Image (tube, rainbow, N blue to C red):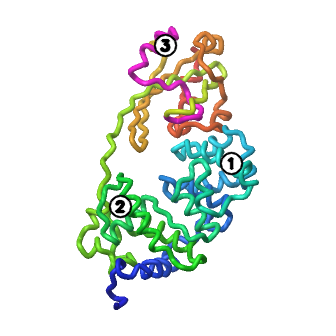
Amino acid sequence: MSSESFSFNLNKAVFSTTLLKWQHQHGRNDLPWQQRNPYLVWVSEIMLQQTQVKTVLDYYPRFTARFPDVHTLAQAHSDDVTALWAGLGYYSRARNLHHAAKQVVQDFNGQFPSERESLQQLKGVGRSTAAAISAFAFHQRETILDGNVKRVLCRIFAQFGNPQDKAFENQLWTLAESLIPQHPQDMPAYTQGLMDLGATVCTRSKPKCTQCPMQKGCEAYAKNLTDVLPQRKTPVKIQELPLKWLCLINQKQEIWLHKRPESGIWSQLYCVPSIDESAWLPYLQKHSLHETAMTALAPITHKLTHRHMRITPYILHTNSERIQQMHIDGQFYSLQDALKLGLPKPLQQHLSTFMHLDWITKSH
């Protein structure tokens, strides 16, 4: 078979050797977590779940400087962990990371296991993440199968199926396992190559097929199916979520914050009272509050994966005695102290604006 034209279905070994050569020459080889320290690999893999590399590059150095090893992270207070995660999104990852660090210390004597099956016992670590840690840190012959890799495999090998179907996902796992290179020392470059190919070349839209090392063997390219594969998931309806923020500010220009519950949006982060628009009037009536005594600020828009939020902040000057009568949990924080806490991204971005408006400093 000529190297100028081959079918990966007939010779899957070509896939791994081609990918390895391309990764060494064109892949990302200067990322700070590309090392054999399983703790640092694990932190990066959790951060990279549904988050772009450029975003993680901003958070990863600060997080690992504060928590340089699994023992430091396991002993940390949960508020310190969420504070460094604030703005990164998907906050259950931070809670799971903290919990898993304690598991490593308690169940594995502070040493990360090298086997994928054992790594999957850690909270928040699924099969693909465990495989990545095992391949990068321990050179185990395990394959990843994240969204990028699924797209690469579906296109190159013309795999048709519903991405939400478990049987089809198992089919992709079997295919991915058949492509693993024979030599364990190749596993870091091969695994990184899978990630790089999907993230930088075989992208969801406008794939750079002319730059792809797999172009001559890609069935989707040959059959003009790159816009068809992988087949689309059933779209999730975007939920519009109108919210009201009650920003309570005392005479010292401190703002009232409380810790949100473990379930729901912004779980375990510190926030001002956040009320659904439909519950706003009953909330005011319950606490004997009047909108006429407040100042409404311009609405804030904030988009999450499946939610579009429209937040209207209301400023109300009050004191501790009045808040005690309202029976709401929390306390007043100075601007400086508030910004050290784990805050929802829109609150973090706008807090100094709230606190430094000219009219706020006037007596009321």
**Image quadrant containing the N terminus:** bottom left
Secondary structure beneath label 2: loop
Asked whether residue 267 is drawn in magenta, I would say yes
From the viewer's perspective, is 330 left or right of 87?
right
What residue is disc 2 on?
204
Instruction: State which mark lies toward you, 3 or 1.
Output: 1
Q: Is residue 338 above or below residue 159?
A: above
> Which mark's residue is nearer the viewer, 3 or 2?
2
Residue drawn 74% across and 48% down? 106
Looking at the rendering, in which quadrant would you find the C terminus? top right
Of mark 2 and mark 1, the one earlier in the sequence is: 1
Residue drawn at point x = 32 percent, y = 52 percent: 233
Report the disc number at residue 293. Answer: 3
- Spatial CA span between label 3 and label 1: 50 Å
Going by the numbered disc 3, the residue's amino acid type is: Ala
Q: Position of residue 246 (x, y in %)?
A: 51, 22
Residue found at the far bottom of this picture:
2
Q: Which residue is mark 1?
A: 103
- Asked whether the residues under the numbered discs 2 and 1 touch, taking CB atoms below 8 Å apart as contact, a structural biologist would say no
Can see residue 90?
Answer: yes
Which image quarter: residue 171?
bottom left
Crowding at mark 2 (Cα within 10 Å: few <14, some 14-19, many 20+): some
Residues under labels 2 and 1: Cα distance?
A: 36 Å
x, y (%) of residue 361? 59, 23
Amino acid on which disc 2 is placed = Arg
Left or right: residue 64 compared with residue 46: right
- Which badge, 3 or 1, comes first in the chain's sequence? 1
Crowding at dot 1, Cα within 10 Å, few <14 / some 14-19 / many 20+, comes out as some
Q: Where in the figure is residue 57, as x and y percent of width and height? A: 57, 58
